[in-house]
Image (tube, rainbow, N blue to C red):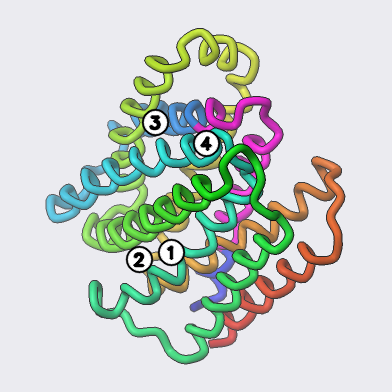
Amino acid sequence: MSTGVMLVVLFAAILHASWNALVKASPDKILDIVFVTGSAGVICAIAVPFLPLPNAASWPYIVASALVHIVYFLLIGAAYRGGDMSHAYPLMRGAPPLLVAIASLPLIGERLTAGEWFGVVLICGGILGLLLVNHGSGRNPARTTRLALINAVMIAIYTLIDGTGARLSGHSASYTMWMFALAAPPVLIWALARHRVAAQAHFRERWYLMSIGGACTVAAYALVLWAMTRAPIAMVAALRESAILFGTAISVFVLKERHGYSRPVAALVILLGVITLKLT
């Protein structure tokens, strides 16, 4: 992976960690995720008239990705309801890069070298190692684990769809905008139907933060899809999850959370994975 592509993905990881920090600090994480998604959809709907249409070959991928993203967002809400974000999040983000790496050869014909595999495994291992720090809690940790693992599969699916679709689109930014513009409305409709009063109050209090989160979401994913047009999808998917490194830094220096030694060790393993990907 070239230095330029790696820096772009790392910047996307910082943006991803930033909007996740907004969600983590929220009194209602589910509604925050919904409105961040909605803000992303509004931004993209405004942007698409000014961008060229994606190539026709990519439209089935755009529609398929939007459908998978809808399921993904709803599963996030289900996983966080009655379960800890700190338990569900490492499962949802740590497993997908490994699944993508395994599926890349048979599905899209991309083969990783031994060094690239080692980097991917280090990053995934470091993320999943956070589960040793965040033991399952909440009302039903087993249910949270099941939902998080199902969502990990959804993330792997849309990663492969979007990596392939962005390459076919001829314009990865336009591909990203259309996907979010299609995926966001059903998620908003679901939230308003189930939590109308709470959603309205939440939006009035945090609309500006959720708008920032939506912009970060769009920018981060657009950069990641651009990178996937220039590097193996599995490598980009793994590097993207280094967002947890930046998330840990934000939690310590901005949110003032206290951590023991386990989390920094997991972060160091992730960092070693990032370095390995750069050196291979």
Q: In this view, does 25 lie to the left or right of 46?
A: right
Among the two numbered marks 1 and 4 on one chain, the one whose residue lies closer to the N terminus:
4
Contact between labelled residues 3 and 1, with CB atoms less than 8 Å apart: no
User: Of the residues under marks 4 and 2, which one precedes in the sequence?
Assistant: 4
Which residue is at 64% across, 40% downward? 138
- Identified by mark 2, the residue type is Thr
Q: Which one is closest to the eye, mark 1 or mark 3?
A: 3
> Splitting the image into 4 quarters, where does residue 111 fall?
bottom left
Q: Name the residue under label 2.
A: 229
Which segment did they paint magenta? 8-33
**What separation in Å lies between label 3 and label 2 (alpha carbons)?**
23 Å
Of labels 3 and 2, the one closer to you: 3
Q: How far, Cα to Cα, is label 4 from label 2?
A: 22 Å
Which residue is depicted at the point 51% across and 68% down?
238
Q: Is the magenta stretch mostly helix, strand or loop?
A: helix
In front: 83, or 169? 83
Please check the rendered image and state whether residue 156 is part of the magenta-colored stretch, yes or no: no
